[in-house]
Amino acid sequence: DAGVIQSPRHEVTEMGQEVTLRCKPISGHDYLFWYRQTMMRGLELLIYFNNNVPIDDSGMPEDRFSAKMPNASFSTLKIQPSEPRDSAVYFCASSSRMTGDQPQHFGDGTRLSIL
Amino acid sequence: SQQGEEDPQALSIQEGENATMNCSYKTSINNLQWYRQNSGRGLVHLILIRSNEREKHSGRLRVTLDTSKKSSSLLITASRAADTASYFCVPGGGTYKYIFGTGTRLKVLA
């Protein structure tokens, strides 16, 4: 089975530009998570969805960040306008069932550099 | 949700040796998971141990859990260069909001 698929793998853009990161979760998984990883702050949960509905977005750093999940097989994380401090690796993960003991399956991330 | 604290922060060993890393947490849990992250890749789930289990094995991995001490350890036996990675523990309390710590960076020298 295919794992979590993220695109693009790398993105370099200038500050002020809009950035859209994409994620395709594992088929049949009800939960989708967006994380950000930096050297300074480690891995931070930004937002997660259950059955396409955002459940907890308390980790979204600012209004410049938004996430959507229009259907069960696709999610986007958008940054508009982007700033150099948004440079990080962004991971998407998915998981099944409601119990809190299910492993999260991660994509290989999008390495974002804002110049 | 709570964050686990991995110790040591970094560990270097020779290929073939065993690697042990530890995890501590603060409040009671239902389970504890260990993940691995190779350089440039996403995290990979390794093993889950439930609060009523004391030890669990998976291949070359051995995980122990001591709920009285609120600690867990991950032992990798006969380490290989491919085990070079960061390792994270995630104490689970029945919520999907996992909080990852800073991990243990393991380097296996050939």
Image: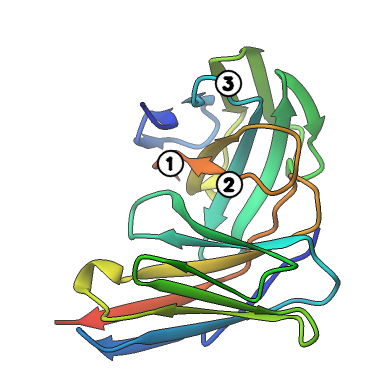
Furthest-right residue in this view: B27
- Mark 2 secondary-structure assignment: loop
- The type of residue carrying mark 3 is Ser
Query: Is label 1 on the same chain as label 2?
Result: yes
- Find the distance from the CA under tag 3 to the CA under tag 1: 14 Å
Furthest-top residue in this view: A71
Q: Nearer the viewer, mark 2 or mark 3?
A: 2
Instruction: Check the picture and name the quadrant holding the N terminus of chain A.
Output: top left
**Contact check, label 3 and label 1, Cβ < 8 Å:** no
Disc 1 target residue: A109
Tell me, yes or no, if residue A18 can be seen here: yes
Residue A99, horizontal then vertical, whole percent: 75, 41
**Label 3 is found on which chain of the structure?**
A
Disc 3 target residue: A75
- The type of residue carrying mark 2 is Pro
Given residues A20 and B60, the one toward you in this image is B60
Residue plotted at (67% across, 70% down):
B53
Residue A63, horizontal then vertical, whole percent: 76, 33
Given residues A70 and B75, the one toward you in this image is B75
Q: Looking at the image, how many numbered discs can be counted on the residues?
A: 3
Disc 2 target residue: A103
Residue plotted at (57% across, 48% down):
A36
- Find the distance from the CA under tag 2 to the CA under tag 3: 19 Å
Disc 2 crowd rating (10 Å Cα; few below 14, some 14-19, many 20+) is some
Label 2 or label 3, whichever comes before in sequence order? 3
